[in-house]
Image (spheres, coloured by chain):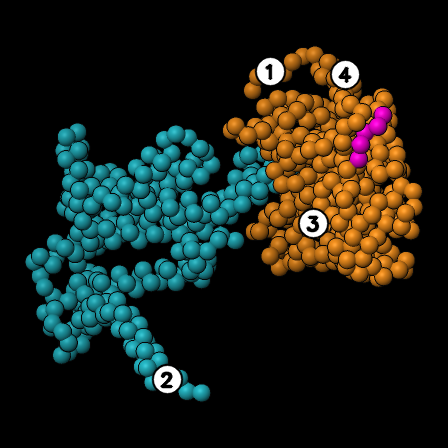
Amino acid sequence: MLSRPADLSAAQIAAADRNASVPKDVAVRLDGVSKRFGTSVALDDAWLTIGRGEFMTLLGPSGCGKTTLLNLVAGFLAPDLGEIFIDGALVTDVPTFERKTGVVFQNYALFPHMTVANNVAYGLKARSVAKDEIRTRVAEALAMMKLTGFEGRKPRQLSGGQQQRVALARALVIRPKVLLLDEPFSALDKNLRASMQVEVKEIQRRLGVSTIFVTHDQSEALSLSDRIAVMLGGRICQIDTPEQLYRKPAARFVASFIGAGSLLRARLERIDTDLADVMIGTTTISVPAKPLAGLAPGTMVDLFIRPEQLRVVSPGEVGAFDGTVAASVYQGGHVDLYIDAPATAGARVLMRLNVRDGAGAWSNGAKIAIGIDGNDAVAFPQSGV
Amino acid sequence: MAKPLSHRMMSWAGRAAVVAILGFIILPAIVVGIAAFNDKALLSFPPEQWSLRWFYKAVSYRDFQTGFQNGLFVTLMSSSIALVIGAAFAFVLDRYAFKTKSLIEGLLLAPLVVPHFTLGLGLLILAAQIGAARGFTVVIVCHVILVLPFVLRSVYISLRNLDQRLELAAASLGAKPGRVIGTVTLPLLLPGLFSGWLFAAILSFNEFTASLFVTAQRTQTLPVAMYNYVREYADPTMAALSVLFIVATATLLTIANSFLGLGKVLNVEQAR
């Protein structure tokens, strides 16, 4: 490997400039990290800071570079460009076995020829921890993961959920500087997944272990994360809290990937540095100006609306637009109405109505008038990302 | 409801065919096995009187004794050397991408298509060229080349089946590369390594054609000694020796099976 530049402070400053809201106490930092596989770019100039104790999720569709980023932090891959820091120390050229990361793989990667106890003890033995301490720490880790009594079993004698607990115990027992979770819940069935998520989140909070969690499941990301980095095509699109991502998506892709929503055709009326006004029918809605930067007033834009921002109004009300119910899908607690409307810019408009609020009254083909609650609306240029 | 007659006939015919094929496979072994107990000094069939004297002669015949010892020595040496070389090449072929990969793979598997007598003759000429005596070295080299493809395939398949995330997990837990190999890679490859070695050993011990060219009186292996014997005598000693051969190999495979399971020995299932 080539020697690294001596003026690391320059890279540190650059990172701080780029990302103003970074946590002070940093566990992991990526400074302009890129990785290519042959001619395809897996990760393109990624800047990311994970605070100590923070639960950071990398969210995106398959092939977005999230697993590559995780593998770079673990040291399974070496970056082509950029630097990686763990606990303030430069680790770009540090081999995996010296990084002290705890990794939980999608298939758990438990050692099939070792017992549960030996799987969990592996990292401690590799680090030449004293025998007595190994015994107590393994027992503690197994107790924490509710695996006491399973010490002598082989991984193949365990259920999927139990295997995952062993994988977590094995990763946590070494007291890692950062815990790396690569889609750990995807192999579990739905009920088990939900309970494991709650448990993992609770343990993570209690131990205060900094965590990077990779998933393509947006609801999983929203429910577990302190912050989420949404990725697409090797780039990080937006890094924010789940609430901010949901309410203020910075790009059309982020908006459509997280939660449900509809796109409506609107006209840009006025734009200044912070806010812009768009008009749909006779309603003027204020949206953040940033995604629309550079567009001239009069341009048609796509207004992104969450289902809960739409409500049924009486026909002819000011600001309402009309549509026809195309499908009504019963979801238990609520009903999803899919509405054909002239104002829509994409597919059908999605409305979510409480069953209690008379959602059952809307049958296919019924005429409906819809009002927009303009708070937290965002708009994007047409046919952008 | 009863099946139509044609179906039943087909089903009987099918069973008969399977029995016939299986019988055909083991028929020679059965014939030789029975002939071994013939009291007469002729390889006649079926025997008229029974005896174990040919077994006694087989184990006490001087050439067979040295042949057995030579064969055992050559087998242990060649299959062990082939295991080390084959495992190393299998590892390189599995883990690294390089331009000459398919060429090297082809060369390593070439002994499968080169006739054994060609290999034996070639080595004989080479040994004569460099003035090497017809000692054990040339025999062992010959056997290493012959069994290498089998070892290579066996280890290669085991490596393919090995989830590399296990090695990554070990490294992330703080294990240095040497420790990863010792505690994760090798233990999981062990069935593949053992089955490769076992097949190499069985092939090497039975090998005749190439051995005929490269062995001398002093270094002849058991199959060569048997050939030399059968050129002069035609008594059931050979048959008795064959029975011993079959029993020994079957015992070896049975032991291997009870330790590892036949699927793993034959390397047809994932090493777990």
Three-letter residue code for mark 4: Ile
Which circle marks residue A185 in the picture? 3
Q: Earlier in the sequence, mark 1 or mark 4?
A: 1
**Which residues fall within the magenta stretch?**
A266-270
Which residue is disc 1 drawn over? A3
Drawing shade for chain A: orange
Q: Residue at x 56, y 51 (%)?
A: A113
Q: Colour of chain B?
A: cyan
Question: What residue do we see at 64% from left, 46% from top?
Answer: A106
The residue under label 1 is which amino acid type? Ser
Q: Does B175 sit left or right of A328 as displayed?
A: left
Query: Is the same chain shared between marks 3 and 1?
Result: yes
Q: Please tell me how crowded label 3 is: few (under 14), some (14-19), or many (20+) other residues with Cα within 10 Å.
A: many
Residue highlighted by disc 2: B4
Give the distance between the C-alpha atoms of the residues marked 3 and 4, in whole angstroms.
37 Å
For marks 1 and 2, give the one nearer the viewer.
2
For marks 1 and 4, give the CA distance: 20 Å
The chain letter under disc 3 is: A
Which element type, helix, strand or loop, lies under badge 4?
A: helix
Q: Quadrant of the C terminus of chain A?
A: top right
Gap in Å between the C-alphas at discs 3 and 2?
A: 53 Å
Kind of residue at badge 2: Pro
Quarter of the image with the N terminus of chain A is top right
Q: Chain of mark 2?
A: B
Which dot marks residue A13?
Answer: 4
Classed neighbour count for the residue bearing mark 2: other residues with Cα under 10 Å, few (<14), some (14–19), many (≥20): few
Residue A25 can be seen in this image: no
Residue type at mark 3 is Phe
Tag nearer the camera, 2 or 4: 2
Q: Are marks 2 and 4 on the same chain?
A: no
